[in-house]
Amino acid sequence: MHEFRSVDDLLTHLLALSEMPSVECDRFTELNHGLQTAALLREEHPDDLELQVAGLLHDVAHPWDGPGQPRHATMGADAVRGLLGVRVANLIQAHVPAKRYLVATRPEYFALLSDDSVMTLAAQGGPMDAVEVAEFETDPDHMAMVALRIADDGAKVVGAKVTGLEFWVPIIQSVAAIHA
Ligand SMILES: [Fe+2]
């Protein structure tokens, strides 16, 4: 299991992601996709630093997973839990279930999905059934999970100008400090 031991350890990984094309689109990097996600969440939820950081980091496990990325959400959550806490980990873990939830509950959502996200949906379990939807909604943080997923889907803009990683370093440090 990959696990970040320190903020520096995490930043080293993020710098590697700045050299790596996104698994979804080779016209932006993995880091750029995370930065776009974080920026969208900062606009919508300016006071929720943990949600913003989870958005930045939701796909950190892409380089560790295989074709179709079946385990990247869980691997990413496991990697950050010790450093950034349970909530950031849970938000990262939920970005795949949140897609399954949104497809089941918002008919207009499916059209927003990238081709890649549509392709992986079946392997991820397809739309949630009614029991799964009800269970998902019992999580008191499920609206933040949905917000992260919607930002994720909107964060695939080629050539997007985004705030750089240096802006996020003190924010990551402040979230880590809470859990130190
Ligand atoms: Fe993503």
Image (spheres, rainbow, N blue to C red):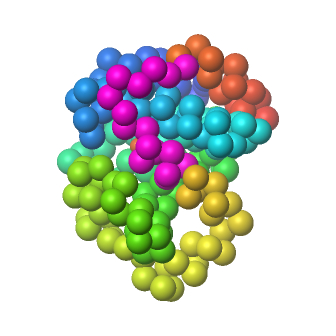
Which image quarter holds the C terminus? top right
Whole-percent x, y for residue 140 in the image:
71, 66
Which residue is at 75% across, 27% downward? 174
Which residue is at 62% across, 22% downward? 168
Region in magenta? 148-163
Whole-percent x, y for residue 63 in the image:
32, 34
Q: Quadrant of residue 28?
A: top left
32 w.r.t. 117: above or below: above
In the image shown, does 80 or 38 lie closer to the viewer? Answer: 38
In the image shown, does 41 or 80 lie closer to the viewer? Answer: 41
Whole-percent x, y for residue 34 in the image:
46, 33
Q: Is residue 22 left or right of residue 5?
A: left
122 w.r.t. 70: above or below: below
Which residue is at 63% across, 63% downward? 142
**Magenta stretch: includes residue 69:** no
Q: Say if residue 88 shows up in the picture.
A: yes
Which image quarter holds the N terminus? top left
Regarding ligand 1, which quadrant of the image does it lie in? top left
Whole-percent x, y for residue 60 in the image:
43, 36
